[in-house]
Image (cartoon, rainbow, N blue to C red):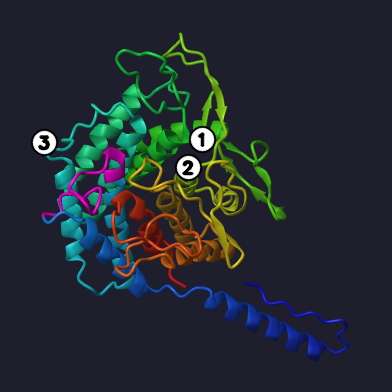
Amino acid sequence: MKAKVIATMFRASVAWIMVTALLFTLTTACSSAAQTWTLDNAYSAWTAYNSTFLASNESTFYQANTGSANPGFWERAEEIEVAEDAYYWSVNNYPTHDHSAYVTEINDLCTGFTASSSYGSDWSSDRFNDDLNWAIIAFARAYQITGNTTWLTDAENNFNTVWTRAQADSNNAGGLIQSNPPTPIGTWTPNEDAPVNFTFVIAGYLIHDNGGAASYKTKADTVYAWAMANLYTTTANNGGPCTGNTSLTCGKIRDSNNTGPFTNYPTFAGTGIGPTDYTYNYGIALEAITREADTTTPQLVANYLMYNMNNASHPYVDTYEGYNILPYWGNAGTNDAGYNGIGLRGVGFAYSRGVLNATTLLWAQENVQAAWNTANSNNVIENNWTTGTTTPSTPLYSWDCSAALAGLLDIPAP
């Protein structure tokens, strides 16, 4: 909400100062009034999520509150990331508190993930390279929090698996492919997409920054150079002037760029550029670009997320206090349901490193407010943040509900 003061003429400088002060006061008051969520709300949402979905032995967040099935591989890895977000939220906001319960839960979730009845420590049976990257990120962060070297070893071993098998170019000069060929190969084609390339950069930096060899950073840098050359644009596919703010530049993250040639897969032709917008691509790009010490491009990427998202099937669901609210990606544990949480995590990461402006923070806070407004009486929040929507009590899916929770934990409270 913006307060406007209209004046026809000011002849005295004192009058001008008074009106300017009034404008600032009204604008600040309106902005603050639009945001009511608090640190207490974030904590209550976290405890509600645990109460609703966490197994009694903390080995997993169950897929739904109506049964005991596990989410899929990458969704389960990303829910470990939400627990890690909660740990850092607690440390950053309540540094003198006891954080051991968060550490224990993260250790238990990783133990459950690597149990023989789940995925073990070698994840190569999953042919989707971005799936491995999500888990590598979660486990590198788990090591950072718990000090358990097993999680770092798992992250390193599986990172090396991705690097070895995901090369589209035999000279290691190209991007990584999302998945390796199935058996039989059928109609499969190499897909060099944003999810696998930007998550690989994040994973490499996390391992390197937690004591890994320099080669992890070198490999991440190689993939980053390809990703920015092929997946980022300010001149095409809706990149460029921001909608409603043409003085600003919006930096688009393409979902894929499969132009080839693929020297490791010479019989396959490239399929061209995949221009579709997905929230999570912007979150991981923001984190990867920030880790690469680029202090300018993150704001352009955030601008696109705020103003130019262009997915015909999943448009902005609403506006709240004049700010675009992120799309609804479906529910019932569908693959896309948690995208907005990953997007907001990337915004929170980049903002905390000082590369995003106050407008971006306010936009993110209003998205979290729109989400919080839909919470049910138990403080659980689904992923449709349209004004007037209320989260039901059942059935609820952990992956759907992780999106708003990540926003509450990763975006600074007003």
Measure the C-alpha gap from mark 2 to mark 3: 31 Å
- Kind of residue at disc 3: Ser
- Kind of residue at disc 2: Asn
Give the structural element (helix, strand or loop) at label 2. Answer: helix
Compared to residue 194, the image places residue 368 above or below, namely below
* Camera-side residue of 147 and 128: 128
Compared to residue 157, the image places residue 296 above or below, namely below
Question: Magenta span covers which residues?
Answer: 57-76
- Residue 116's label in the rendered image is 3
- Residue 255's label in the rendered image is 1
- Residue 52's label in the rendered image is none
- CB atoms of marks 2 and 1 within 8 Å: yes
Measure the C-alpha gap from mark 2 to mark 1: 7 Å
Residue 282 is covered by the magenta coloring: no
Q: Can you give x and y, in whole percent of width and height, for residue 340 in the image?
A: 44, 51
* Camera-side residue of 295 and 282: 282
Please tell me in which quadrant of the rendered image residue 72 appears: top left
Q: Is 294 positioned to the left or the right of 207 in the image?
A: right
Query: Which of pointers 3 and 1 lies earlier in the amino acid sequence?
Result: 3
Give the structural element (helix, strand or loop) at label 3. Answer: loop
Examine the rendering and report whether any part of residue 207 can be seen.
no
Q: Which residue is mark 2?
A: 281
Most common secondary structure along the magenta stretch: loop
Examine the rendering and report whether any part of residue 360 can be seen.
yes
Query: Which of pointers 2 and 3 lies earlier in the amino acid sequence?
Result: 3
Q: Can you give x and y, in whole percent of width and height, for residue 207 in the image?
A: 30, 42
Q: Can you give x and y, in whole percent of width and height, for residue 194 in the image?
A: 47, 35
What's the residue at 15%, 54% (across, down)?
Answer: 55
